[in-house]
Image (cartoon, rainbow, N blue to C red):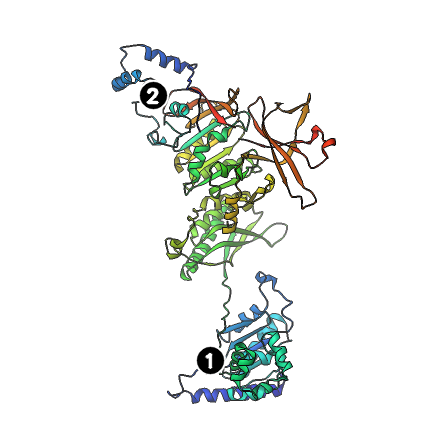
Amino acid sequence: MLSSRQNKTFARAASRHKAEFYARQNPAARSKRANLWYALYFPAFPALVDDRHSGSPVISLVAQHCQQVSDCISLDGDDALVLEVGRSLRYFGSLTRIRACIESGITAKLACSNFFQAVAPSASASLLLARTGHDIAIGKPEDLRSRLGGIPTSALAIDRRIQKKLVRCGLFYLRDIWRLPLAELRIRFGRNLGDYIEQCLGLRPEIRTPWQAKSSYHDRYDADHGLRSVQQILYACELLLNRLEAFLKKNHLCTDQLVFHMDYAASSAPHHHEEIMVNIRKADREAQLFLLLLETQLSGMNFPGEIYAITLRVRHFTDFRPAGGFQDKKRTQPEEHRSQLLDQLAAKLGSDAVQRFFLQQDYCPEFSTHMLPYLTPLTEDKTDAWHSAISATQNPCWLLKPPRPIVIRHQQLYYLSPLTLLRGPRRIETRWWEGKGIRRDYYVAANAQGNLLWIYQDLARKPETERSHADWYLHGFFG
Amino acid sequence: MNTTVPTTIKATTPEHKVEQLLQQTQGLWRGNSQQTAASDTARPKQRHSADLFDTCSSPFPADNTGEAGQSTGHAELDILLPWGAWPQSGLIEVINKQAGIGELQLLTPLLRERSQRQSSILWIAPPYPLHAPALAQMGVNIRNSFVVPAQTSCNQALWSIEKALQSEECGLVLAWQNWLSARVIRRLQLAAREGNTLGVLFHQRPAAHSPSTLQLQLSSAPVSQPGFRNMDVQVLKARGSHKQGRVRIKLPC
């Protein structure tokens, strides 16, 4: 927070900047844009992560609030940001009002008073001032040299090795650097330092990544009378989904996850809520598809009371790509088929109940196949693994997890009837680097029932002399 | 898959006995197919066009009886089926009391062909966990294969089978159930017709008067040659044909 003396400094800087701004209204000076950068630095922020916003840093909340002042905002790490306020001065009237607006928001939203703020004609200079704890406002670029002179070179946002090099050369403060010719400095300490110094002094334009707020959608339906039946709930949800579809089409977006928040009243307690999440594999924007999946999910649910409000929230958005576009044509892989059926099955059975195969290159059969939820996309690497994992040897279609011990009767392996070994052994020896190594001899065996079995003798458990018949296991069937 | 055992259609059922009797009776009026039938008797076993009902219009025109489907990979089984291959759509019932006697091996050409399409293959409640490297080795595109595990309850599994059969996204549905009534099979058959999808239903006991497109009973047979296993495939019912028969096919092991 600023003292009254600093308030006056802010006001003076703003009035000077404003005067310059109006002076530039003549056609000759109009081409030059009057930039004024407002930097905010929060020393306590890096440790804080906002859980409410899916792990995004708290600085995003500050940026969100600062959108009331300017739409040109750029983050500088997780603890500082800078916003251009030169163009907002006319609307707010003075820099003091801008500061009051920003401070009130931060205090109200984050209850945080430990922050530094500085204003300067260049973004780098304002950030440097804020990060070094200088709560000052500089209106004219000509003042930058004198006001920045007292800042130590160790505080510059440059490579640490260059900082040490500067100190070793006796350049402890920026004022020491001002004494040197910039061209020579560039030769001795590299281009980056020269560019940075020029950016701080406003002599070189800088490119900053603009911050954009994460899109989110929120809509609510309040029922006049309690909703009892599924049909009534679906009617309300259809209204919400139609509005969502219009929003998505307007913004050229689509989504793969919707969250319905159902508020209902039960006899035990007046306020209950239930969340229904609708996931689809490929992002879409059709209200009818979402409605179908929601209907499937609702068919298995029972609300003990009447629903009086439904809230629809969407936080995951992706850009809409029409089918057959340039990017589709560029794809080397065959296009993934539509997945409305799978989405519907997952909505009814649960997303984990619809699975897809994932092959992993592993000699041990039980580790070579993983079943993943169908929503998991197969990446390029996984596809490569899929191709390379297919070995030349014959494998059974069914694999028992875990393997079943085989009974021995009259000195013969027995599964429903005595077994005859047809092929083998095929040795699999792997995972010796782990404590529990695998050493098995696999055989193909048949019984009188016509089953073709994949059995193995476990060699890892005991030495050869102590090996017994109890080490035989059934691991799969050739379907 | 190649088989070396010659075709042996056992005329054990009453329908076959009637058919044999009709074939032996010369001068019997055979409708418009008389000429064809006469010529076919000269070339026996090439194709079963001597069938009395061949030229009759099928009572089930929506079953794609005219479309050529995927060959079974076994010539003798192709001959026995009225389509000369697996049906293009509909419901195939596979009855085998013991899982793992070669039922998937029998379907390998069908699985391979269907998995290469854009549509997906859905495995519903398989009796044991599937081993993906083996499927990939068989030529099945496992990127298009999805599994609903066996832990799913019976009614949810049936719901999934029906939805999958109704959907055009699914090229082939393979489902395992212990037993299903004719009423349930009828419903699934209608779903398959609606979605123009092929479903294979594995179960242990045949339902009486099953309305499925094709009903097969599988049983293992004694091994006659090392490196191969034998399996008897009995056609209990095939839509569009009155024939029943049994063939013994050889599967490499």
Are discs 1 and 2 located on one and the same chain? no
Name which residue type carries label 1: Arg
Q: On the image, which quarter does residue A302 sit in?
A: top right
Name which residue type carries label 2: Gln
Q: Position of residue A278 (x, y in %)?
A: 51, 51
Question: Which chain hosts label 1?
Answer: A
Whether residue B159 is visible here, answered yes or no, is no
Disc marking residue A180:
none
Q: Position of residue A354 (x, y in %)?
A: 53, 43
Residue A472 against residue A330 in the figure, above or below: above
Task: Identify the residue position indicated by label 2 in the image.
Answer: B46
Q: How many marks?
A: 2
Residue beneath the point at 53% across and 47% down: A385
Residue beneath the point at 53% across and 73% down: A66
In the depicted view, which residue is nearer to us: B139 or A161?
Answer: A161
Indicate the secondary structure of the residue bearing disc 2: loop
Disc marking residue A87:
1
Q: Position of residue A353 (x, y in %)?
A: 55, 43
Residue beneath the point at 57% across and 62% down: A53
